Structure formats: C-alpha cells, structure tokens
Amino acid sequence: MGQKVNPKGFRLGVINTWDSRWFASKSDYKKFVLEDVYIRKLLLVRLKSAGVTRLEIERSINTINITLHVIRPGVVIGRGGQGMEDLKKFVMFKILEERKKRNLLNKKNTVKIDLKVEPVKEPNLSAYFVASNIGEQLEKRLPHKRVVNFALEKIINAGAKGAKIILSGRIAGAEIARRETYKSGSIPLSTLREDIDFASNPALTKSGYVGIKVWICK
C-alpha cells in the first residue's frame, strides 16, 4: 500500500505555514480547533459566491483575526463596506451561539472579530477553487472528461508547472464505481521545495458522491 501524505501538511514549516496560527493551553486547545473548523465551514458556505480559496485564522486575547482570500472581493466588502460589517456581526453571533451550546461562554460574553480581505490574482492556481468548479459542473451532469481536460488546460495556461486530477466513485452514473486519473505536466510530490497546492472536494451527483482530488504544482 502506498503511504499517502497531504502535500500541504508535508511542506509545513518548509515552504508552507499553518492556516490557523495561535497558542492555547491544554484545556482550550480542542475548543479552539473545533471552533476554527466551525468558522471555516460557516464562511465557505456563506461566501460561496465570492469564491473563497483560503481562510487564515489568528487569535489574540478575546480577538479572532480572519483573513479571507477571495476571487471576488467586492462581493464580501459590499457597498461602502456594509458587507464586511454584516459578515462580522454574523460570524460573532454564530460563534457565541456555538459557544453557548457547548457551555464555553466567557465572563464578558463577547468576542471581537477582525476581518481582512485579500484578492486572489490567479484563481486557476488554487486547488480548492478548481475542485469546487469541477464538482459544480459534474453536479450539472456535464461530461466528466471534457470538464477535467478543460480544467487542466486552464491550470497550465495560468502558469502552473503541472497538475493532476483524480475522480473516484460512480463517474457518469456508472453501475460500478471506478477511479480515473488525469495528468498534465510534472507533479514532483516528494520534492519539498516545490510549491504544491492540494484540495479534496466531493460532488453530490444523482448516482452518489464522486470524489475529486486536485494537485497543482505552482
């Protein structure tokens, strides 16, 4: 059996840094990890139309700093910055609601949210964006080969060294689940110096889930 390692985790501390950066005591650590996962899920659903590719979370005393890497920053910011204010209130309300459920409210019962928006210059070099795009098209029942080959073409045209896409499941509604691999260019997974972005995102088709994995060598 091949030992599969997440390309991002493999490069942590070498060329990649952590998406969540904070220090916590032993008792608070698991609470903050679960809260980070909750915030990520919340924002990825809420800001789907803005095209979120990455979320960075930093914590200081009673403040959560969130950096959003988005393709369409105007959708998040809104007219006169109103969108940002609404988003802050929404995140704050949801976090306090979640803490209340798990009996984790502090004495002040408040949490300060600081939001920053970073525009993404080249969306086709983001594995998460490519994977979610392929997923959306597969859900619309478009031919999978055409979708994947078009995605690979766009990635290479965006300036990537190489890309690999794997689909697994009941592809095109087949009776028997299978796995298909599509490659273009070079993907040196064991070279730590290479900046490789990876994302996994399932698509819910009529015949069940189709798993999509994307590797991009920038």
Image: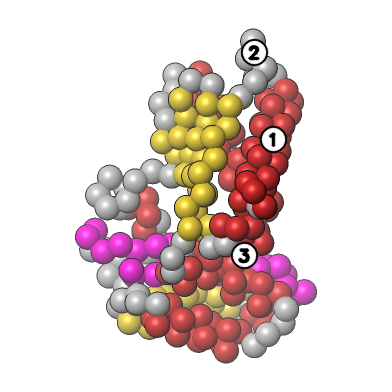
Residue 98 in view here:
no
- Real-space Cα separation, disc 3 to disc 2, in angstroms: 40 Å
Task: State the image quarter where residue 133 is shown.
Answer: bottom right
Q: Nearer the viewer, mark 2 or mark 1?
A: 1
Residue 134 painted magenta: no
Residue annotated with mark 2: 108
Which quarter of the figure is the N terminus placed in?
Answer: bottom left
Image height check: is 99 above or below 76? above
Nearer the N terminus, badge 2 or badge 1?
A: 1
Residue annotated with mark 1: 89
Kind of residue sitting beneath label 1: Lys
Tell me what residue is drawn at x 54 percent, y 21 percent: 62
Assign a secondary structure to mark 3.
Answer: loop
Q: What colour scheme does the image use?
A: secondary structure
Residue annotated with mark 3: 202
- The segment highlighted magenta reads 192-218
Q: Nearer the viewer, mark 3 or mark 2?
A: 2
Kind of residue sitting beneath label 2: Lys
- Real-space Cα separation, disc 3 to disc 1, in angstroms: 30 Å
Q: Nearer the viewer, mark 3 or mark 1?
A: 1
Where residue 103 appears, as percent x and y from the top left, is: 70, 19
